[in-house]
Image: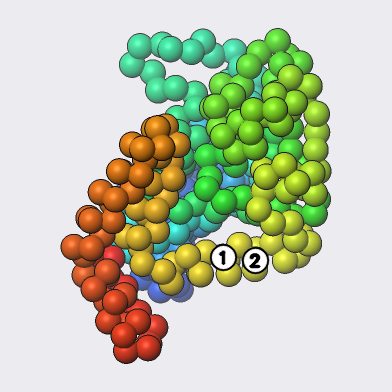
Amino acid sequence: MVRSSPQANVIRRVDAPDHALVRSAPRRNLVPSAPVTLAIDGPIASITLALPGGLLDRAGSEALADAARGAADAPGVRVVVVSGDFGTGWSASALAEPESIPAVPSLAVGIEALAAIPQPVIAALDGPARSAGLEIALGCDIRLASEGATFAMPDTAAGSVPRGGGTQRLPRAVGRGQALRLLLTGEVIDAIEAKRIGLVSRVVPSNELAGTSRALAEAIAARGPIATRLAKEAVHRGAEMTLEQALRYETDLTVILQSTADRAEGVRAFQEKRAPHFTGE
């Protein structure tokens, strides 16, 4: 049984614990077939993609943005897992949209919101992730793949370039040479090749992907949430700095962390030889 909450884009399952929320966006799609759903289970938020026809359109992109912001803002969430159908590209309606229209959000608003989540984000890829689908995956921090997953950036075959950050995030993930190989040829690669070039971190059988991604999420969630956020921030921001600037920034973040209750708890737990209990404070 499902009961609608006062917020139209939130569904609370009455047979589930209070913290188990499912966010469905856009608001007009309050059904299981919504393009994107957000479920929160304690410290782990799960974003599930069910894009119509496996294609990302404006509604799907805005739904992804809504889910990403919901996960980022949810109290107690320490890690986010993105799974489902990443898809094979942009819809025809999306490709027909002109870019840079004043007062109209970018078509890639969902990917940008996903990349902006401060908590660590895991992508669990099972099936094709091409064009916009691969760009969604690149908006995540850690990518796990099933043996049947495939990857491609075929946009140049249609006389266009990726419009969801692919030309920038792909080389940051796999290096300039491998990125250009995929961007310029549109080559479809399998999960083993994706792991070889560093696009994914691990490849597992399809029936083990959900459990593997959940175990990784639980391992991250058990660590200091402020520390994991700051470590992610140091890596992402540091990549845009000189080494000297990045090292100074890392030191600044360390100083901030030392003033937190979690840092004190970590020191006490180490001295007392017990597992720490982090509160995110």
User: Of residues 248 and 178, which is closer to you in this image?
Assistant: 248
Left or right: where 150 falls relative to 21: right
x and y percentages locating residue 203 in the rendered image: 74, 56
Q: Secondary structure at mark 1?
A: helix
Q: Are marks 1 and 2 in contact (CB under 8 Å)?
A: yes
Density class for disc 2 (Cα within 10 Å; few <14, some 14-19, many ≥20) is some
- The answer to whether one can see residue 234 in this image is yes
Q: If the image is split into quadrants, where does the C terminus sit? A: bottom left
Q: Residue furthest front?
A: 244
x and y percentages locating residue 97 in the rendered image: 54, 14
Q: Residue at x 65, y 53 (%)?
A: 201
Q: Residue at x 52, y 39 (%)?
A: 139
Quarter of the image for residue 263 reads bottom left
Residue type for callout 2: Thr
Quarter of the image for residue 50 reads top right
x and y percentages locating residue 73 in the rendered image: 32, 51
Density class for disc 1 (Cα within 10 Å; few <14, some 14-19, many ≥20) is some
Quarter of the image for residue 180 reads top right
x and y percentages locating residue 49 in the rendered image: 59, 46
Residue type for callout 1: Leu
Q: Residue at x 49, y 23 (%)?
A: 107
User: Where does label 2 land, which residue?
Assistant: 212
The color scheme shown is: rainbow
User: Where does label 1 land, which residue?
Assistant: 216
Left or right: where 123 falls relative to 242: right
Q: Secondary structure at mark 2?
A: helix
Q: Residue at x 28, y 65 (%)?
A: 280
Left or right: where 248 falls relative to 196: left
User: Of residues 206 and 223, which is closer to you in this image?
Assistant: 223
